[in-house]
Image (cartoon, grey):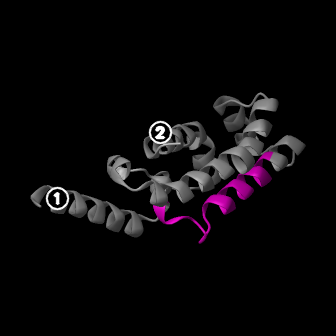
Amino acid sequence: MTKHEMVNHMEYYLRKMKKLLEKSGVPEDYLEIPLEAYSLKADFIRPGFNWLLHIFNNAFREADRIWSNNFMTEDVWARMEARGETEMEEVVEFRKALIVLRMTVRTNKRPDFFKKGKMERAIKNASHKKTSSKSS
C-alpha cells in the first residue's frame, strides 16, 4: 500500500469513528492528520496506519456494534441519559466499550504519526529535504 493510500485510509477511519471517539471523550484534535502528512515517508506513516487500523477493527468495531445493534440514535441516547437510564444492560455495555475505545486511543504507545510534536518535526524535515534537493 502506498503512503497516499495509507493516509487516505486513516482519514476514512477517523471519519467513521468520529462520533464514537467524541462520545468516548477523545478530543477531536487528538488524532489529527495534517495535509502535509502526504509528504512524509511511508516508514513514518505505516506504524500510525497499522495502529489506527487495529483500533478501527477492534475497539471501534465493538462500540459501533453495540450502538448499531441497539438501534441507538442521538435522540434515543439523549432521552436515555435524560431519564437516567444508566443501568440498562445495553447502556452499561456501550459505556464499557467506549471506555475501552478511549483507553486504546489515549495510550502512551500511540505512534509518532499521531504525536503532534513528532509529526511537526517530521513534516519540517520532509519539507527541508525537498527544498534542499531542489536547490542542489
- The image shows residue 21 at horizontal and vertical percentages of 60, 48
The secondary structure that dominates the magenta segment is helix
At horizontal 12% and vertical 61% (from top left) the residue drawn is: 136
- The quarter of the picture where residue 103 lies is bottom right
| Crowd band around label 1 with a 10 angstrom C-alpha radius: few (<14), some (14–19), many (20+) | few
Residue at the front extreme, as displayed: 136
- Which residue corresponds to mark 2? 8
At horizontal 73% and vertical 42% (from top left) the residue drawn is: 61
Residue at the bottom extreme, as displayed: 108
> What's the magenta region?
94-113
- The image shows residue 48 at horizontal and vertical percentages of 54, 56
- The quarter of the picture where residue 122 lies is bottom left
**Amino acid on which disc 2 is placed:** Asn
Image height check: is 111 above or below 13? below
| Crowd band around label 2 with a 10 angstrom C-alpha radius: few (<14), some (14–19), many (20+) | some
Q: Please tell me whether residue 102 belongs to the stretch shown in magenta.
A: yes
- The image shows residue 93 at horizontal and vertical percentages of 84, 48
**Amino acid on which disc 1 is placed:** Thr
Q: Secondary structure at mark 1?
A: helix
- Is residue 47 found left or right of 123 in the rendered image? right
Image height check: is 61 above or below 37? above
Q: Which mark is residue 131?
A: 1
Q: CA distance from mark 2 to mark 1?
A: 25 Å
Q: Please tell me whether residue 88 belongs to the stretch shown in magenta.
A: no
Q: Is residue 77 among the parts visible in the rendering?
A: yes
Q: Nearer the viewer, residue 86 or 6?
A: 6
